[in-house]
Structures are given as C-alpha cells and as structure tokens.
C-alpha cells in the first residue's frame, strides 16, 4: 500500500485531559504557546553586576519620568539598589517575618520589610529607605487608584487600611477628623480569613482585595464611605499571595483548588481538566505560598515560578507559562530565586561603556541584542541561584513537545518529519497497542536529508515527540508529519 502522510499538530498543552482522539498534548516543556504550535523559551543569562550577599526575596525596577531605571532587591538582611556596576545597601535590619515586597507610587518606591512600611525617594539615585511615620504594621501592600493600601494588619489580619488620597505618607487614625479630611480609613472583612493580596487596576475595576476564602471588589465612591466593597467570590480565595498577575482586563491567580481568572465581576476556572492536577502533582505543597507571578509584556504571557519537592530551599525550579490571549499553557525547567518585571539596560553612552574597561566586562551577553539597542523595553528578570541578576535573553532551552494521539487501526510507522524550522530537531514515536496500555517511547532519531526521522514499528495508537536541543536557533514548532502504511488485521 502507498505510504500515507498525516500531519499531527502540537495542540494545547493540557496534561490532565484524556489523550485519545483529542487535540490536546501531554508535554510542552521549555516553550511559549503561540497561535500555531510553540516558540522557544530562552534561558537566563547572568549579568555582570555582582551578586547580592544572600538570597533575593523580592525585587522591582522603577523607570522615572526622565527614563532613568532603578532596580531594587530585598534579602532577609536588607534592601539594595543597583548603582553603577554593583549593589549598594539602602537599608539594614532583621525581622521576625520573612515578608519582603515592593510597590511604586509616583517617584517613590515603598517596601515592606517584615511588617514595617519603608520609603525611598528616587531622583536619579535612590535614597536610603526610611520608615513611614504613622503607617500601620502589615504584611500586604498595594495601590488602588490614588491610595496606598496596607493589608493583613498586625492588629487585624482580616483588615486593610489606606492612606490619604494622593498622600501615601499620611496615615491618620481611622475615624478621626484628620482621616476624614484626607479620605483615609480602614475596612474589616468579617468573613473570608486573612487578607492575602491587594491588586489595583484590573480592567474597569478600581481594585481587588483577595482573602484566603473570598475576593472583594473595591470601588471608589468618595466621602463619606471612600470605598464600596462588593463580593466577587464568596467561596474561593487566594492560596499564593504573590501569584496574582494582571493580564489586560483580567487578573489570573492561584486559588486553593487551581488556577482562576477574574475581571472583578465574575470568576472562571482556567486550569480545571487542563493543568490543575499536573500543577498540584508538581508543586511542593509546603511551599505553595511562595508561587510568584509576573507579566511578560514582550511575549504577552503571564509567568509563575514555583518549587517542586526536589528544589533546594529558596530556589524555584519550574516556570508555568500562560498565554492569556490564546488561552494556552506551557511550562519551563529553570532555577530562579525570584522573578520581577524589569526594563532593558541598553542605551548606555560610550563613556558609560568605557567604565567597564573592556567589551568582555559588559554586563550584557552581547552587543547585537535588539534588547540592548532599544533600552526602554519591558522584560522579565530574575535572580539566579548565585544571587546574581539575570534576564531571559540567552540561548533557547532544550524544548520537548508532543503531538496529539491518532489511531484506531493497525499501522506501520515509517518515519516522522518534524515541522520545526531547525534541522537539529529530533523525533521519536510514542505508541501503544490498546487504549488501556501505558504509552511506550521509541528512540530519538536525527533528520535525514529529506527532513524525516526514520522509524519502523507497528502500532495502533501513535503520537510523536520532538526534541530541539538546547542552544539551537529556531522560532516556530508547528507539528509532525507522520509517514505510515495501513496494515491488515486488527
């Protein structure tokens, strides 16, 4: 019989879904979901700025009105800013709580160091962090409209307090005449447990307050009530305080039963029967609260780092990636301490470059990067396991992608042609004779001159797995063309 050519696409990665005759795929590692198939996930490159003295617990970057980028990082022992070629300490202290967090307001950066609210003004060079006089003690910080908000207060874990209107340094006693004048107040949520996060600017919603077992929408109404709070979800709350990521008009977050999305009016599950079961099998449950999310503007995805049970203390060894426009998932395998939204560090003058003494001493991987030439793009940065600043501009990581499974009648498999723009891509068959059987894996074969990875086996159900080696240059992986011949019998 003539050889039949069938294309198997790299469908949506949904490892929780039944494979037979579906469009979903069980593996999509070190890739980013695309409209057709997947794109490569780049590895991290450590920049030559020197390392922090200990593990980075939180970080942020601020770009002022004049285009100056200032990067902050917090360890258990202090807060640092990146100045010149190294880190300068701006605050020293010890706390009983390990909470470290940042938020921006105008030309200032506010930090939570334990339960203490600190402030650093930025005018070209960041000033030392100082405690904000009169601010409440709490472990959650955020901005809603023109108010700085503190939550999970030391004297009320289920309460939030907000500063004066456009007066983030003024925290008068709630209920006093001074508080009414600047519209500062407090809100206690009697049901739902502790405050987990405060998120502002979700679509047309002023803000969201996440509790352990509930979500409330905050709407600014002016005096005398200041804010109106309406329940969005009365049952499910937030399991990981650092997981909410604002994606356009919605916020994606990790609830105790899986991944969810809300626009401030309704809530829907985006992980059930797709990746929720896989995620909870992978993550270290004891470190679930460490899951940290960030928005990647360049790739239009949300990204979360998390730790598996095998990850060392203080290290996250997995990335979960969600293309919220296409509603598709993928994951990565890489080690980080913390993720944060950053800006490219290009646009340096020749005089500034000369400070490094030689091109080999530059903190950038190479001068040909479009990122370097731009200098004002938003990127995702991280701290690596040596406490050094890194960004995801390196070579592509080793990518492994499965196709959907086809079958129902016995076939002879002659070869697999990866539909990937890389001649280094290899392929192997994934097969079983009965639906009840465990899947079996063949051997990776290299492409021949015609682009086919030749295989010879007889089976009933067939999928293909493609591997693109680390360091290869490629841009799209669409699927696999399978060369088969129908066999007689059952």
Image (tube, rainbow, N blue to C red):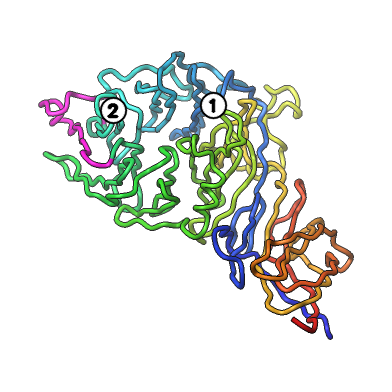
Q: What residue is rendered at 64% in x and 40% in y? A: 334
Q: Which-is-in-front pick, marks 2 and 1?
A: 2
Percent coordinates x, y for residue 457 in the rendering: 82, 69
Question: Which quadrant: the N terminus?
Answer: bottom right
Q: Secondary structure at mark 1?
A: loop
Percent coordinates x, y for residue 16 in the rendering: 54, 58
Residue 174 belongs to magenta span: yes
Residue 47 position by quadrant: top right
Q: What residue is rendered at 46% in x and 22% in y? A: 126
Residue furthest to the bottom: 1
Question: Which quadrant: the C terminus?
Answer: bottom right
Q: Secondary structure at mark 2?
A: strand
The secondary structure making up most of the magenta span is loop
Q: Which residue is mark 1?
A: 56
Q: Is residue 448 left or right of residue 198?
A: right
Percent coordinates x, y for residue 302 in the rendering: 50, 49
Q: CA distance from mark 2 to mark 1?
A: 24 Å
How crowded is the residue under tag 2: few (<14 C-alpha within 10 Å), some, or many (20+)?
A: some
Q: Which residues are magenta?
A: 167-192
Q: Which residue is mark 2?
A: 153
């Amino acid at each position: 019989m003539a050889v039949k050519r069938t294309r198997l696409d790299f469908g949506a990665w949904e490892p929780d879904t039944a494979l037979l005759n579906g469009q979903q795929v069980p593996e999509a590692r070190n890739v980013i979901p695309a409209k057709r198939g997947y794109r490569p996930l780049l590895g991290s490159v450590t920049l030559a700025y020197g390392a922090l003295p200990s593990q980075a617990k939180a970080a942020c970057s601020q770009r002022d009105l004049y285009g100056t980028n200032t990067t902050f990082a917090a360890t258990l022992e202090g807060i640092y800013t990146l100045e010149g070629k190294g880190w300068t300490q701006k605050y020293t202290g010890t706390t009983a709580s390990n909470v470290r967090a940042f938020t921006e307001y105008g030309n200032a950066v506010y930090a939570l160091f334990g339960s203490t609210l600190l402030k650093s003004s930025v005018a070209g060079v960041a000033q030392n962090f100082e405690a904000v006089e009169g601010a409440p003690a709490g472990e959650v910080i955020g901005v809603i409209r023109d108010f700085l908000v503190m939550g999970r207060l030391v004297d009320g874990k289920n309460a939030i307090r907000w500063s004066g209107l456009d007066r983030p340094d003024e925290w008068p006693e709630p209920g006093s005449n001074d508080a009414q004048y600047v519209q500062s107040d407090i809100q206690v949520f009697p049901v739902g447990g502790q405050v987990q996060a405060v998120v502002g600017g979700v679509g047309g919603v002023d803000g969201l307050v996440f509790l352990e077992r509930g979500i409330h929408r905050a709407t600014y109404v002016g005096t005398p009530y200041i804010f109106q709070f309406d329940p969005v979800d009365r049952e499910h709350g937030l399991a990981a305080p650092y997981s909410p990521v604002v994606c356009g008009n919605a916020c994606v977050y990790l609830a105790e039963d899986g991944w969810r999305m809300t626009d401030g009016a309704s809530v829907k599950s985006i992980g059930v029967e797709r990746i929720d079961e896989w995620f909870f099998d992978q993550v270290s449950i004891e470190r679930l609260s460490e899951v940290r999310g960030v928005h990647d503007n360049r790739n239009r995805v949300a990204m979360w780092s998390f730790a598996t049970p095998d990850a060392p203390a203080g290290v996250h060894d997995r990335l979960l990636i969600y293309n919220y426009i296409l509603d598709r998932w993928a994951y990565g395998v890489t080690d980080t301490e913390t993720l944060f939204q950053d800006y490219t560090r290009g646009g340096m003058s020749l005089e500034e470059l000369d400070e490094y003494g030689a091109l080999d001493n530059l903190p950038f991987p190479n001068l040909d990067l479009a990122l370097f030439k731009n200098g004002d793009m938003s990127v995702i940065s991280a701290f690596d396991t040596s406490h050094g600043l890194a960004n995801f501009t390196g070579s592509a990581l080793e990518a492994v992608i499965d196709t959907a499974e086809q079958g129902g009648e016995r076939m002879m498999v002659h070869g697999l042609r990866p539909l990937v723009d890389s001649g280094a891509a290899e392929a192997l068959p994934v097969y079983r004779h009965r639906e009840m059987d465990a899947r079996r894996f063949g051997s990776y074969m290299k492409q021949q001159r015609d682009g086919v990875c030749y295989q010879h086996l007889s089976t009933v159900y067939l999928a293909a797995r493609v591997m693109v080696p680390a360091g290869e240059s490629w841009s799209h992986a669409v699927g696999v063309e399978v060369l088969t011949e129908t066999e007689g019998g059952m």
